[in-house]
Image: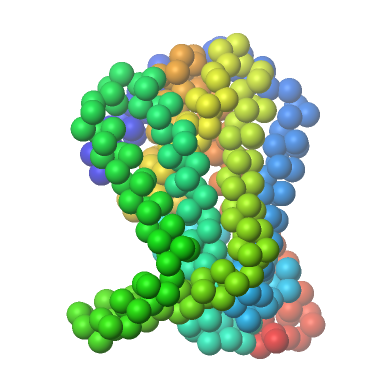
Amino acid sequence: MLLLALLAVLFALALWQLDLDSLRHSIAQIPLWLVPVLLGLQVISQLLVNLQWCLAARFSNAALSFDKMLYINCQGALVDSITPGVKVGGEVTRGVQISRIGNCSGEQAAAVVAMQKLFSLSAFFLMNLATMGVILRNVTALRSPFLQVGVYGVICAFLALFAYMFLFPQRMQTWLKRNENTGFQWTKRVKSFTLTLLGQVVLMRRNKAAFSKLFALSVFIWALYPAKLYLLMLYFPHIISVPQMTAVVFTAYMVAMLPVFPGGLVGFEGSMSVLLLLFGMATADAAVVTVLFRFITFWLVMLMSLVFVAIYKAKMTIDGVSTYEQK
């Protein structure tokens, strides 16, 4: 919370120092043709995420058509925009909708959600681990050995958990079954959910093609985000290196995951702009890059999701079919 407050203050101070001439000059550096290119890349990113959800659902015997899953994901994205940090609300929405529209059990729907999260977050933390050293080496305030050990320790802990679930699901299943009825009521539900997920992992391990496809898709989707920043940064005089750009993107998203502000607001903008400033960008350039990047990767997604949900519901009303009764 203190970190986010500091980032918010630094971001606000940076904006306060801006003058209109510098801002207009920074905006003028971006060619008009680049905006639709970045918008197109974001649309591709969202469609690939939807494809990943479809693959996870198909593997869990809760297969849904691409358009139905897109409708579910758009609803989840809208809830994500008002849910702090880790976006639990959006995932709950997706799980409920998958169960209703996919006509499957709650456990199957929960397994689909957890499966997608498992692959997406494992790729995210793996790529974060590879780039975090860039931030820790280049930002003087973060060179403390204790801080570095703490940051690397948290990321490695998440990776170790994901790796153990992928590599030794049967061992974890055995341990959980021995202790399934112990603990508080909420821990019992967590254990039951984890057992369902591990069952899916066991099945997926027998299908190496599906396993590889989902993980490779997660890596590719996350790699598109620094690629968008790279295209945007080409037109500014102080071009930071590709590793630095990648580190800025993943660090900003990691800060945005903290459950404080809806949709990761303030945390993402503050961390991205501050890191760009620390890497030597002018204040106006950093502000323009941050705002445009955030608009394309967040606000545009919210707008497209709202439009698609409205059109989908209108179509269902015209067809006389309840969305929740679709098979």
Query: Is residue 116 toward the left or the right of residue 251 in the image?
Result: right
Considering the image in quadrants, where does the N terminus appear?
top left
The image's colour scheme reads rainbow
- Which of the 4 image quarters holds residue 64? bottom right
Q: Is residue 79 visible?
A: no
The answer to whether 183 is drawn above or below residue 268 in the figure is below
Of 78 and 150, which appears nearest the observer?
A: 150
In the rendered structure, the answer to whether residue 17 lies left or right of residue 207 reads left
Between residues 241 and 253, which one lies in front from this camera angle?
241
Image position of 61 with respect to 286: above or below? below
**Number of dots carrying numbers:** 0
Residue at point 36%, 45% (across, down): 155
Taking 68 as reference, is 204 left or right?
left
Residue 158 in view:
yes
Picture residue at 60% right of the left edge, 11% below the top = 237
The x and y percentages for residue 29 are 67, 17
Q: Nearer the viewer, residue 37 or 112?
A: 112
Q: In the figure, 295 relative to 32: above or below?
A: below
Give the residue at x 53% y 87%.
105
* Residue 198: quadrant of the picture: bottom left
On-image quarter of the C terminus: bottom right
Percent across and percent down for residue 236 are 61, 16
User: Residue shown at 62%/87% (left/top)?
Assistant: 103
The x and y percentages for residue 20 are 53, 16
Picture coordinates of residue 251, whole percent (x, y): 43, 37
